[in-house]
Image (cartoon, rainbow, N blue to C red):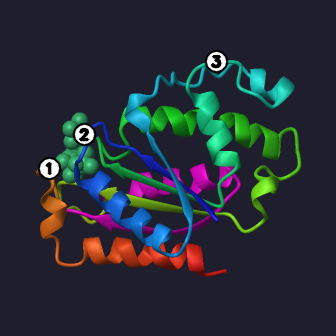
Amino acid sequence: MRVLGLYGSPRKGGNTDILLDEFLRGCEEKGATCERIRVARLQVGGCRGCGGCEKTGRCVVEDDMQAVYEALEKSDRVVLAAPIYFYNVPAQAKAVIDRTQALWTRKYIREEAAQGAAAGPDRRGFFIGVGATRGKRLFDGTLQTMRYFFDAIDVEYAGTLVYGEVDEEGAIRNHPTAMKECFETGLKLVSST
Ligand SMILES: Cc1cc2nc3c(=O)[nH]c(=O)nc-3n(C[C@H](O)[C@H](O)[C@H](O)COP(=O)(O)O)c2cc1C
């Protein structure tokens, strides 16, 4: 079982990093192999909307996204953790999401065989989110983005853990349930079939 953890915050050691570490610790405890990618360290430009991927199934832009495509395709589980920035994920993570348009194109335009076939048919995605405010609709836009992201990369959207009213770096450690929930959900995500 291979798990890809995408660290979506530019703040190293921040709240979503802490939660994803816990989540992946749970996955590893069940014997999964975890690959960790810190998205903000990559050089990934935005999608150019050029339609090049419709011709070949590959993105024409040669940057760090090429390594992310490879990692996505060989993973059985994809876990993205990101803070809310202006009611969506930070720009660096959004660039990665937009660039999965090449995978969307393979699935829906080119109708190529399921991606990640090497990893098997049971592929799942999970989102962990944190925001500072307490609004009821804080995560609405992002969760909609996640539905389409996981669909584009051809994994079943297995769930979400989101936490509002968390702002200061590391404040999530004081949350009454978040750390335990992430660890336990990591255990479950790799053990359930
Ligand atoms: C540029 C920027 C935009 C933000 N936008 C929002 C927002 O729209 N809603 C919100 O609740 N919090 C917002 N926040 C707060 C972060 O979501 C919050 O600090 C979070 O805990 C950061 O997580 P991290 O430590 O994993 O980076 C914003 C923070 C920054 C730096």
Q: Residue at x 43, y 63 (%)?
A: 24
Please name whichever residue, 23 or 80, is drawn nearer the observer in this view of the structure: 23
Label at residue 169: 1
**The residue under label 1 is which amino acid type?**
Glu
Label 3, on which residue? 62
Label 1 CB sits under 8 Å from any ligand 1 atom: yes
Label 2, on which residue? 11
Q: Are marks 1 and 2 in contact (CB under 8 Å)?
A: yes
Q: Is 39 drawn above or below residue 141 in the view shown? A: above
| Mark 1 closeness class: few <14, some 14–19, many ≥20 residues within 10 Å | some
In the image, 38: left or right of 55?
Answer: left
In the image, 71: left or right of 57?
Answer: left
Disc on the earlier residue, 1 or 2: 2
- Is residue 167 visible from the viewing direction of this image? yes
In the image, 68: left or right of 20?
Answer: right
Q: Residue at x 72, y 42 (%)?
A: 104
State how far apart marks 1 and 2 are (Cα). 8 Å
Residue 150 lies in the magenta stretch: yes
State how far apart marks 2 and 3 are (Cα). 26 Å
Q: Are marks 2 and 3 in contact (CB under 8 Å)?
A: no
Q: Is 10 drawn above or below residue 144 in the view shown? A: above
Residue 167 lies in the magenta stretch: no
Q: State the image coordinates of residue 84 (x, y, percent, origin top left).
A: 30, 48
Disc on the earlier residue, 2 or 3: 2
**The residue under label 3 is which amino acid type?**
Glu
Label 2 CB sits under 8 Å from any ligand 1 atom: yes
Magenta region: 138-165
Label 3 CB sits under 8 Å from any ligand 1 atom: no
Q: Residue at x 76, y 20 (%)?
A: 52
Query: How many circles with numbers are drawn on the protein?
Result: 3
| Mark 3 closeness class: few <14, some 14–19, many ≥20 residues within 10 Å | few
